[in-house]
Image: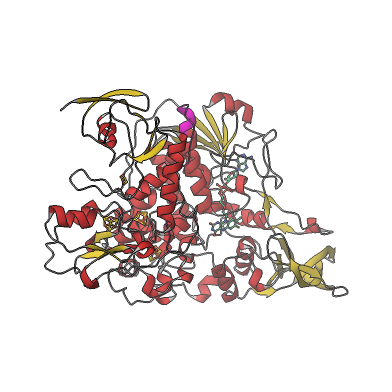
């Protein structure tokens, strides 16, 4: 065969006559993406992902079906070609219907592979369950008790019976059972060392994932014991501190993480010194200053977090607060009220300036507070606090709702002349917290620490994460940020630029917009009500700080995990469309248009066909015809509606040899074994 001389991306290549540009590129290590090309099959040229530029003619041509010619000069890698391939992928994604990732995982700020851990739990393998959880979250015993459950809000099980899978209580069970047995593989420690100021969830999480990379850290905290708000904010009855102690003891066991308490930044330790002594410094100091009520006499009230901190320092005991009024409608207000209830027989009252519907507290917190006989007064705002004969006199004004404000909620407006007075022994102002950033560290307009949002970098070798960056948020958000910051610091120590992973996700939509027919259900969903935790007796509940509810039993956990309908694409690990889309930074919403909603086909006992995911590459049809010598698959319909089908739309015949060639060759998850799931 005669030789042909061509250039690809400036590289002089001697190739064989009759080869395609793609073949020559592949032989010479030049990567060109393909979806529809297969060496052993006839060529279709349908995906157009392999386009390259013929520099002499200026034409763009598909490399998989264009033969080389002597003197050809081909551009396979350039900004133009990148953009062209990205557009091709944008188009493919725009008509693609599936769920790369399960909605629960997408909703979790820590990104835990929930569907996978439920699968392990269903099999009774709770060590594996915990292992999957700890890949993204190192504090599962705590989170299993106090997470607001973002994942459950988006859980697709809601479509079946309006009750999400009880995801978090499965986590709690696995963590309680195995936390002390589970030991991760630990690499040898390097010489690099990071100072972490703040031993709360963000600080501990960063220390954990740094340790998994062999990087040591020293944690510094101003309080006598570590844990941050897990110890000094969240009350004992929701998160017992012996559980927290067990959880934190594991970090000591790992080695390479040292905790130094009673060390306050700006007093006992200085930022400038830490910057010099360590390779990097992470500020994870939370938001620890109670917000002002801007009310005359407010110094007579105690701040919400200060009240809880005092109780924590006293081992969750304290003096009888007498008649108590708590100002605020958030979770801190609920925790103050429910703690006060446990210490007094007098009335405990929450005053909130908006309505019940607008209360920021989690529903469960509000419900449990009501069960514990906390009283609520809505549309009520304090205007003055004074002391008379050893009693607090609180003047309030009634409010009504006006226009929407910047938060999108209707703004409460005082009603003239509606002032009234109430007497109280204790007034607690639980209206929020602020961050107290160290001097010299840049802050934003909310006084939180300003970071580069891409990599959590502040300045010099300083990084920051958690509440002190976002303002008061949640533990799981602090954990998500702590893990990413550890990645970013590790990259910085290696002298690399940290880039967050670009992950595409195609979604069939939120559960509220879906019907049961639109779910891809391989097996009939298990008919079972959601499992609920058992509460301790009412008497014990309001008279002690004992944990209010008990962990599910093993049987309940297995049965609960069976309620999961497994929402993510079975092919997400191997999908070429997903891989290329991430490489070329394509986006499912880049091109908006109506999607054809094809019915998936479940009629074959072993094989599922999900035409919404098909990219019409024809590979399955050709492999069946050209390799297996069967003619079972064919394109149906025309244009926009074209898709792979069977003769007269009949099910794939059961005498199909089930060789799996079509499944293996499909570049996406349009054909799969049913057994891949469950
Ligand atoms: C009362 C209350 C109840 C809550 N309930 C929940 C809940 O149920 N679920 C949920 O998800 N979230 C809840 N949250 C929010 C949650 O606790 C926080 O979002 C989370 O703890 C933030 O983690 P972090 O590591 O950023 O900060 P923190 O937990 O606040 O930790 C910061 C650490 O830094 C230390 N520190 C501060 N300043 C200094 C300094 N100058 N020098 C040295 N050390 C310093 C502190 O002592 C602390 O240990 C609650 C918060 C409060 C206040
Ligand atoms: S086939 Fe690929 S792109 Fe489509 S849903 Fe599955 S993983 Fe996502
Ligand atoms: S049904 Fe299962 S996979 Fe689907 S969102 Fe709920 S927990 Fe996640
Ligand atoms: S179902 Fe067939 S035509 Fe569709 S993407 Fe898979 S292999 Fe290609
Ligand atoms: S690989 Fe060339 S057109 Fe699909």
One can see residue 138 in this view: no
**Residue 236 is one of the magenta-drawn residues:** no
* Nearest to the observer: residue 78 or residue 14: 14
Quadrant in the rendering for residue 601: bottom left
* Nearest to the observer: residue 26 or residue 222: 26
Q: Position of residue 360 (x, y in %)?
A: 63, 64
* 165 lies left or right of 121: right
**Residue 493 is one of the magenta-drawn residues:** yes
Residue situated furthest top in the rendering: 12
Q: Position of residue 572 (x, y in %)?
A: 33, 53
Q: Quadrant of the N terminus?
A: top left
One can see residue 123 in this view: yes
Q: Quadrant of the C terminus?
A: bottom left
Q: Residue at x 61, y 76 (%)?
A: 373
Q: Residue at x 48, y 35 (%)?
A: 498
* Nearest to the observer: residue 634 or residue 268: 634
Q: Residue at x 61, y 26 (%)?
A: 273
Residue situated furthest front in the rendering: 57
* Nearest to the observer: residue 240 or residue 104: 104
Q: Main secondary structure of the magenta part?
A: loop
Q: Residue at x 56, y 59 (%)?
A: 235
* 246 lies left or right of 616: right
Q: Position of residue 496 (x, y in %)?
A: 47, 29
Q: Is residue 49 depicted above or below 433 in this figure?
A: above
Quadrant in the rendering for residue 198: top right
The residues colored magenta run 490-508
Q: Position of residue 461 (x, y in %)?
A: 56, 29
Q: Total label count?
A: 0
């Amino acid at each position: 065969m005669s030789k042909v001389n061509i250039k690809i991306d400036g590289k002089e290549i001697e190739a064989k006559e009759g080869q395609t540009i793609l073949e020559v590129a592949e032989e010479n290590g030049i990567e060109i993406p393909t979806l529809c090309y297969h060496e052993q099959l006839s060529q279709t040229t349908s995906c157009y992902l392999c386009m390259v530029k013929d520099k002499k003619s200026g034409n763009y041509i598909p490399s998989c079906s264009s033969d080389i010619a002597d003197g050809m000069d081909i551009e396979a890698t350039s900004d133009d070609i990148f953009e062209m391939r990205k557009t091709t992928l944008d188009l493919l994604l725009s008509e693609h219907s599936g769920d790369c990732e399960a909605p629960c995982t997408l909703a979790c700020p820590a990104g835990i592979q929930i569907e996978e851990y439920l699968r392990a739990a269903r099999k009774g393998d709770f060590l594996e369950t915990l292992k999957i959880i700890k890949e993204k979250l190192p504090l599962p015993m705590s989170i299993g008790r106090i997470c607001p459950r973002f994942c459950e809000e988006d859980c697709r099980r809601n479509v079946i019976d309006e009750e999400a899978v009880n995801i978090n209580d499965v986590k709690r069970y696995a963590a309680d059972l195995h936390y002390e047995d589970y030991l991760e593989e630990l690499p040898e420690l390097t010489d690099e060392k990071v100072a972490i100021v703040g031993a709360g969830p963000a600080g501990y999480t960063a220390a954990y994932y740094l340790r998994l990379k062999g990087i040591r850290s020293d944690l510094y905290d101003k309080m006598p014991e570590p844990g941050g708000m897990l110890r000094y904010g969240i009350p004992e009855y929701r998160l017992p501190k012996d559980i927290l102690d067990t959880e934190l003891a594991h970090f000591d066991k790992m080695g390479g993480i040292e905790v130094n308490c009673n060390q306050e930044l700006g007093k006992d330790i200085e930022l400038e010194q830490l910057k010099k002594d360590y390779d990097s410094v992470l500020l994870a100091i939370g938001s620890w200053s109670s917000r002002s009520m801007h009310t005359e006499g407010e110094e007579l009230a105690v701040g919400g977090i200060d009240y809880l901190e005092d109780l924590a320092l006293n081992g969750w005991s304290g003096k009888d607060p007498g008649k108590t009024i708590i100002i605020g409608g958030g979770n801190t207000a609920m925790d103050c009220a429910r703690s006060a209830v446990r210490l007094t027989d007098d009335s405990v009252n929450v005053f909130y300036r908006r309505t019940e519907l607008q209360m920021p507290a989690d529903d469960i917190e509000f419900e449990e507070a009501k069960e514990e006989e906390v009283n609520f007064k809505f549309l009520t705002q304090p205007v003055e606090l004074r002391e008379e004969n050893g009693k607090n006199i609180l003047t309030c004004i009634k409010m009504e709702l006006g226009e929407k404000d910047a938060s999108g909620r209707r703004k409460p407006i005082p009603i003239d002349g509606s002032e009234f007075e109430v007497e109280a022994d204790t007034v607690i102002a639980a209206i929020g917290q602020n961050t107290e950033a160290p001097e010299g560290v840049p802050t934003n307009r909310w006084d939180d620490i300003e970071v580069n949002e891409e990599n959590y970098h502040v300045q010099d070798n300083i990084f920051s994460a958690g509440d002190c960056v976002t303002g008061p948020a949640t533990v799981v958000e602090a954990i998500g940020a702590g893990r990413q910051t550890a990645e970013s610091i590790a990259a910085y120590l290696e002298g690399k630029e940290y880039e967050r992973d670009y992950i595409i996700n195609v979604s069939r939509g939120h559960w509220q917009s879906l019907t049961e027919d639109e779910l891809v259900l391989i097996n009939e969903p298990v008919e079972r009500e959601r499992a609920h935790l058992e509460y301790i007796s009412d008497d014990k509940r309001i008279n002690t700080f004992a944990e209010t509810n008990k962990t599910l039993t093993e049987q309940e956990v297995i049965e609960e995990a069976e309620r999961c309908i497994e929402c993510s694409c079975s092919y997400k690990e191997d999908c070429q469309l997903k891989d290329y889309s991430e490489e070329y930074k394509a986006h499912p919403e880049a091109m908006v248009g109506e999607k054809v909603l094809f019915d998936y086909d479940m009629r074959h006992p072993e094989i599922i066909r999900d035409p919404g995911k098909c990219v019409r590459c024809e590979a399955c049809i050709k492999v069946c015809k050209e390799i297996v010598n069967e003619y079972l698959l064919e394109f149906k319909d025309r244009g926009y509606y074209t898709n792979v089908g069977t003769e007269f739309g009949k099910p794939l015949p059961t005498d199909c040899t089930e060789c799996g060639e079509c499944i293996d060759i499909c570049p996406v998850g349009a054909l799969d074994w049913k057994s891949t799931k469950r």
